[in-house]
């Protein structure tokens, strides 16, 4: 009974909020106030992705949804669900900060079988996938070496458009992805 009364008084004194204070008297931020990894940006990662995106769009592909950003520690992965249609090709582009030395992209089918992976080395990754069946696929980004910020963008376009993956991060895009952040 005493514990319940003390808790009720404490909550009333805090205006109904359970507040935590640091030793200096500042209130701790709530979980909604904490920045997420996806809120952080690397100008060089963005520059690499913008350059590669421009190349892809001039070749007939259009952006599908919003960029996917985050932070990966060494050997960690992040996965996103992506509906894909037969008769359409998809390009998945990824770039990581300089501390993320090897970034890998893979696509898995709904049964968990890997259907395609990127063949690039370094902090940039790109793959092309033209599914034979419509359905839900899973795009995975993995930090194979190092840790850091990443950004992934997905594009869709018609079949028959050839895109050389090694050209996407050339010129300014590739250098920005490999240089220090």
Image (spheres, rainbow, N blue to C red):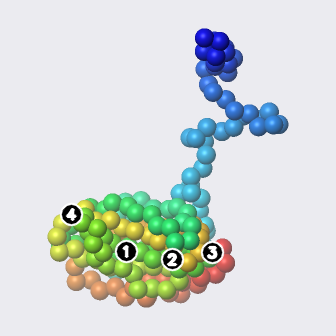
Taking the image as shown, residue 51 lies to the left or right of residue 85, namely right
**Residues under numbered marks 2 and 3 in contact, where contact means CB atoms less than 8 Å apart:** no
Q: Quadrant of the C terminus?
A: bottom right
Q: Can you identify the residue that label 1 sits on?
A: 106
Q: In which quarter of the image is the N terminus?
A: top right
Q: Residue lying furthest front in this view?
A: 1
For marks 1 and 4, give the CA distance.
16 Å
Q: Can you identify the residue that label 4 sits on?
A: 135
Q: Which of marks 2 and 4 is nearer the N terminus?
A: 4
For marks 1 and 2, give the CA distance.
12 Å
Q: Can you identify the residue that label 3 sits on?
A: 99
x and y percentages locating residue 108 in the rendered image: 30, 70
Say if 151 sits above or below 167 in the image: above
Q: Earlier in the sequence, mark 2 or mark 3?
A: 3
| Residue density around tag 2, few if under 14, some if 14–19, many if 20 or more, within 10 Å | many
x and y percentages locating residue 105 in the rendered image: 41, 75
Q: Nearer the viewer, residue 66 or 3?
A: 3
| Residue density around tag 1, few if under 14, some if 14–19, many if 20 or more, within 10 Å | many
x and y percentages locating residue 42 in the rendered image: 60, 67
Task: Please tell me the numbered disc located at residue 165.
Answer: none
């Amino acid at each position: 009974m005493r514990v319940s009364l003390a808790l009720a008084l404490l909550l009333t004194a805090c205006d109904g909020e359970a507040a935590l204070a640091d030793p200096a008297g500042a209130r701790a931020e709530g979980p909604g106030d904490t920045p997420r990894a996806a809120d952080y940006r690397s100008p060089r990662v963005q520059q690499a992705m913008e350059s590669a995106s421009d190349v892809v769009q001039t070749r007939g592909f259009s952006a599908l949804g919003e960029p996917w950003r985050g932070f990966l520690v060494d050997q960690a992965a992040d996965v996103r669900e992506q509906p894909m249609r037969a008769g359409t090709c998809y390009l998945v582009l990824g770039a990581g900060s300089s501390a993320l030395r090897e970034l890998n992209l893979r696509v898995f089918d709904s049964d968990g079988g890997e259907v395609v992976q990127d063949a690039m080395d370094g902090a940039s990754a790109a793959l092309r996938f033209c599914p034979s069946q419509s359905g839900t696929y899973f795009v995975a980004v993995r930090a194979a070496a190092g840790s850091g910020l990443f950004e992934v963008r997905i594009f869709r376009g018609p079949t028959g458009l050839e895109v050389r993956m090694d050209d996407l991060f050339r010129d300014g895009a590739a250098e920005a992805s490999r240089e220090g952040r």
